Amino acid sequence: MDREDLKREIKSLLIRRRALLLAHNYQTADVQEIAHHTGDSLGLAQAAAESDAEVIVFAGVHFMAESVSILAPEKTVLLPRKDAGCPMADMITPEGVADLRKRYPGGTVVAYVNTSAAVKAASDICCTSGNAVNVARSLPLEADPLIMIPDQNLAQFVAGRVDRKIVWHDGFCYVHHRYSAGDVLEARNRHPDAVFVTHPECRPEVQVLADRIASTSGMFTFARETRSRKIIVGTETGVLYGLRKENPDKIFIPLSEDMICEDMKLTRLEDIRDALLNLEPAVKVPEETRVKAKKPLDRMLAVPRD
Ligand code: CIZ
Ligand code: SF4
């Protein structure tokens, strides 16, 4: 079957199943093209919770489908590739959180949304790359030290912007962490007329060279607002699809063509079709964990985005 036929079949299955298809900004262009919504993990989880669809197909990775299950437990949540995980989320476990609490007694565990439901359940408040600074500011001074998990780079981004005691776990995202200041200088040399926007999951040495540090949603705002016509983008290359579509008059250049998350690229149109046909693989967070994990998420949702 050719790709256009497959896309038509998926569209009719979505109607038949009363299903909503959500695609993360890092998915392939094919998948993003047919999704009802594209966005970051939190925006998509909120879109799912607000919709009256009975079935949510989440083209993304496991922790993102879990977030939907936490916020909308009555819905069937499908993750078309059950092997799509997040290596950074896997770097921290509930036992790891308990060890950090022992090491920093009286501290507050701030869990990036890129964590499993079980880790969220062991944490005090969540944050995203878009609201981490505001989450830190929202906490009372007695909450210090803020124990940020799992991403060391996001933690250092926050530490440079708030006058608080911040400690962090040593996790990282391999897609962002492997780039250095040298890569930025090289890209800037090749495109001297471009501005550079990067993700807080990149190393501090990359962040200091950026014109803007932003979550993927923040990058869409930056792209709209900047007067520059050329933008070097320091995040997973999937985001270029949406940026180019929304800003046809601007030129987007990846910091590196290799900035690819293998797990994000696992989901193919065939997997989405099969998930809709079979109503699996489904992700359901056990109720006890769900109730505990919802608390830090709700606490975060009460804080405005940066
Ligand atoms: O929260 C997300 O969706 C991630 C992982 C990236 C971002 O900045 O949107
Ligand atoms: Fe995880 Fe990084 Fe892939 Fe995002 S890009 S899913 S943080 S490994």
Image: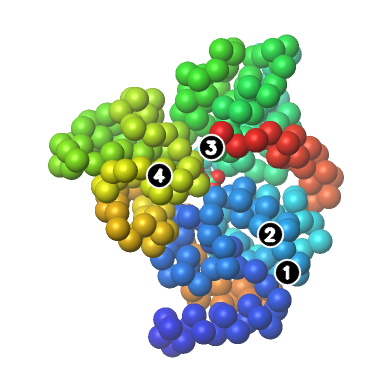
Which residue corresponds to mark 2?
A: 48
Alpha carbon of mark 3 to alpha carbon of mark 1: how far? 27 Å
* Nearest to N terminus: mark 4 or mark 2: 2
Q: Position of residue 299 (x, y in %)?
A: 75, 34
Label 3–label 4 contact, CB within 8 A: no
Which residue corresponds to mark 4?
A: 225
Residue 276 placement: quadrant:
bottom right
Q: Residues within 10 Å of mark 1 (few under 14, many from 20)?
A: some
Q: Position of residue 159 (x, y in %)?
A: 51, 19
Q: Amino acid at mark 2?
A: Ala
* Nearest to N terminus: mark 1 or mark 2: 2
* Nearest to N terminus: mark 2 or mark 3: 2
Q: Position of residue 135 (x, y in %)?
A: 64, 28
* Nearest to N terminus: mark 3 or mark 4: 3
* Nearest to N terminus: mark 4 or mark 1: 1
* Nearest to N terminus: mark 3 or mark 1: 1
One can see residue 105 in this view: no
Closer to the camera in the image, 158 or 194: 194
One can see residue 183 in this view: yes
Q: Specify the quadrant that holds the N terminus.
A: bottom left
Identify the mark at residue 304; answer none if there is no mark.
Answer: none
Q: Is residue 39 left or right of residue 279?
A: left
Label 1 sits on a secondary structure element that is: loop
Residue appearing at x 36%, y 39% in the figure: 197
Alpha carbon of mark 4 to alpha carbon of mark 1: how far? 34 Å
